[in-house]
Amino acid sequence: MTVVLRCGSLRGGYGDSHVLRELNLQINEGDTYALIGKNGAGKSTFLRTVVGLLPILDGTIELFGRDIAELPTYQIVGSGVAYAPQEKAFFADLTVRENLRLGSLSLTDKQFEDALRRVKDAFPFIGGRLRQKAGTLSGGEQAIVKVARALLPNAALVLLDEVSEGLQPSVIDRVVQALSQELARRALTIIFVEQNVDFVMRVASRYGLIDRGQIVAEGLMSESDAASRIASHLSI
Amino acid sequence: MSRVPGLEDGSRTSVVRMPMTSRLIGWGPGKRALGLLIILVAPAPFLDAYTSGVLIQAYIFGILAISTDLAWGYSGILTFASAPAFGLGAYSIGTVFVHISMSGWSIPLAIAGGVLLTCVLSVGMGWLAFYSRTKVSEFYIAVLTLSMSVLLSQAVLYGGAFTGGSNGLSGFESIELPTIAWYLIASLALFLCIVLALILVESDCGLALRAIRDNEVRCRYLGLNTPAIKTLVFVGCNAVAALAGAFYAIYSTVVSPSLTGIILATNVLIWVALGGRGTILGPAVAAVFVNAITPQLSTTIPLYWQGLLGLLFVVVVVTLPRGLLPEAWRGLVATARAVADRRSGGAGRGAAEHSWSVNSDATIAISPGESLPAPQEVGGVVLKLISVGKNYRSFSALTDASAEISRGELVSIVGPNGAGKTSLVRCITDGEERSSGQIEIAGQALGRKPPNAIVRLGVGRKFQSPSVFETLSVSECLRVASWKGRVPSLWRRKALVNLPEESVEVIRALGLLAVWDAPSRDVSHGQRQGLELAMVLALQPSLLILDEPTAGLTMPERTRVGELLTRIVSRGNIALLLIEHDFNFVKQISTRIIVLHFGKLSADGTVAEIAESKLVKEIYLGRSKEEAHS
């Protein structure tokens, strides 16, 4: 079993405030792992720390067996990580195609065209909008492009932060389908941060419950008590 | 007024009191001001004429740095206007004293003339830069002021005998005072400038400036007339720069083209960045320090001193991006904490375990406050859309949309991504957005009103992505919203943040008190959503427009927010327009649903009608046609 990501006693956060406190986590190749917790529990902070947007204040993060403490974001991403942030981070004045290309600079032109074809099959609306400026897309459309951009570069680890937010139900179905196809096609590990429990229960194989910056419980989605444990953690 | 658990009951309002901020230095503002005055004035008897002269000029440039810090550091207006304003003030003195006379009446007249001319030019530039309805870059004002600086330099350079050309005007008759008197006047002027600037930035108005710097769009949608405020700040800062220029000319009896040019303008920005943008004291100290050592360095190392200054600037920008003073202060605070920790035997070491300490001296008050236009009114049409259309060039995002929404209704707009939902919201909240048709808010035509004027008609809008003030704390964001678009006090910060009960309920439901003092950029996405919702509710609008208010919230939080929204609407004095993709949530709380599809209102009916319609099942929920038909 290949370990993709291992965090040991990880502390992270903003300035003096430690949002992540002694977080321990191991993600193996092929995992589709849902990180579930209340608002402010540290979910997005965790993803931002993994990609180097926030500093590691203490503890370790090993990515593909390598300590990333001193690595800048572009090197972490270059090692095979794709990240779809919660906010709609786009180059508003560039076209959808240019935005997608910038998200997959590791691919050759031919590889990009192949990958783009797959993404267009998954999300047909993108095909008609490639020449449109990303800033003029609606909020929901930007959310779709965000998922597409994360899937394009064939990264081994994909981090998806609340990607179902702002999507109509039928498009969420398409996202589930697209992720399933990618998982069937290649070795892919995904970490989800989600509030939409229904969505992650359909796509994730494992879950971790996070509270005040610590993983307090883990389990398999296939286990019969998964739904009730998640619901009780979120106080539903 | 209901009593909210955990909040004290005041005589007229329910309040929650926050512990006072622990202060590093136990001195109050009065003692600090006295200390500053002593530092500035005390050396006077011991200074020789040369040193006094150098310090007088340094203090004048300190004033110039403060005025620029107010514009750039606090209000986000990157301006090169300090030098042309300074030059205008100086040249008005020079030309009047040389060509007319230096008598009792001409001194105030020359000062007033310079300041007035500066104000007129600044109003013109402000109107061009801040009132433009098209989106202009924040650098537009920089280019505009830079051009003004170049123009004015050329004007004085080629002004012939009137301006003295490249030599300027010098040695003219001016007010005769002993050097120590000049020194005391300059010290007092700098002291007053620092104190007044600090009072302004610590006031509610200073908070408004920081809010505008952070997120001008959000400010406009909270009702603040940001173009007017920015123009006023810009004009005020330039007027102070002109006064400093006049003082410089009266004291030095020398005016030259360099006082209006881009070198001085750039130097001022360097002093501000060196000292610490947005700190008042930092830019003043940097300006005084650089100008005090310049004469010495320019004689001992004439070839290198400017290079050295440039190098220092580069080093500071790279290593201490926030400037010297804030970094020095941070170091001091860290040292003080370490010392306090050691004294208390390491008890404070656990401080980092707490997420954000609640140490603000702000107090929330739940009070009805002054409502925006007549929310007490129950029933009646509050929003009327008449054939509204919106085009983006050849693309038609919204076509012929007509509908009416009354108080007491919670109308959800649903539709596929890209159906035109947010475009419709834009048309309602900004008069310039509409391509065709008419909109009326409570019987008043929207016309081409800007967003801040529409807020005053009673419209509150929450954006799709949470739009708050990133560097402001949660409590400061709510404070800005609580003003309901009125320009706040210039000299004080109110002890109470007046919020309606609905806002406080959201604050409590989403745990915002736990992050009360955290910069809003550092709180979670869901809490930012809650914060923006609480801010919009603070406006007490009669038409509340929420674009996906529950995105990023957990299920219990959604439920609480849903219950709250239902309760607000049930009072009958508010209409709520909701855009939301969670169809179950929509079904639970709506009184009516409108379906938008390809920019057209495709259906408008009760929850039961719409939920069962084939249209919704097909286009929105994505069920197959067969399934929908069955």
Image (tube, grey):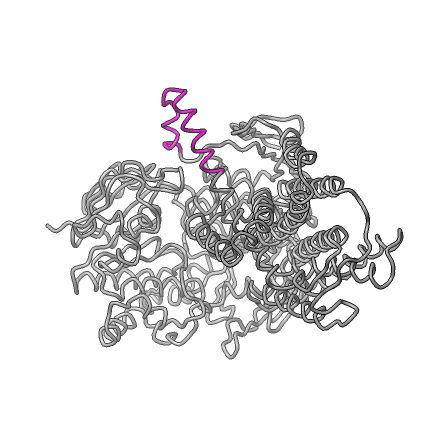
User: Which residue is at a point 74% across and 55% down the rendered structure image?
Assistant: B249
Total numbered labels: 0
- Residue at 46 percent across and 33 percent down: it is B333
Question: Which sits in the foreground, B138 or B187?
Answer: B187
Name the residue nearer the viewer: B551 or A223: B551
In which quadrant will I find the N terminus of chain B?
top right
Magenta region, residue range: B329-354
Residue B555 appears at what percent x and percent y?
38, 44
Residue B628: percent from the left, percent from the top?
35, 65
Q: Quadrant of the C terminus of chain B?
A: bottom left
B370 displayed left or right of B475? right
Magenta span includes B333: yes
Residue B289 vs residue B466: left or right? Answer: right
Q: x, y percentage for residue B540?
A: 62, 46
Q: Say whether residue A161 is visible.
A: yes
Direction left: furthest residue: A1
Residue A95 drawn at (x, y percent): 40, 73
Residue sticking out furthest to the bottom: B394
Kindly report the secondary structure that dominates the magenta region of the rendered protein. Answer: helix
Residue B578 in sight in this render: no
On screen, residue B192 above or below B137: above
| Residue situated in front as seen by the camera: B84 or B72 | B84
Residue A232 as seen in the image, left or right of residue B539: left
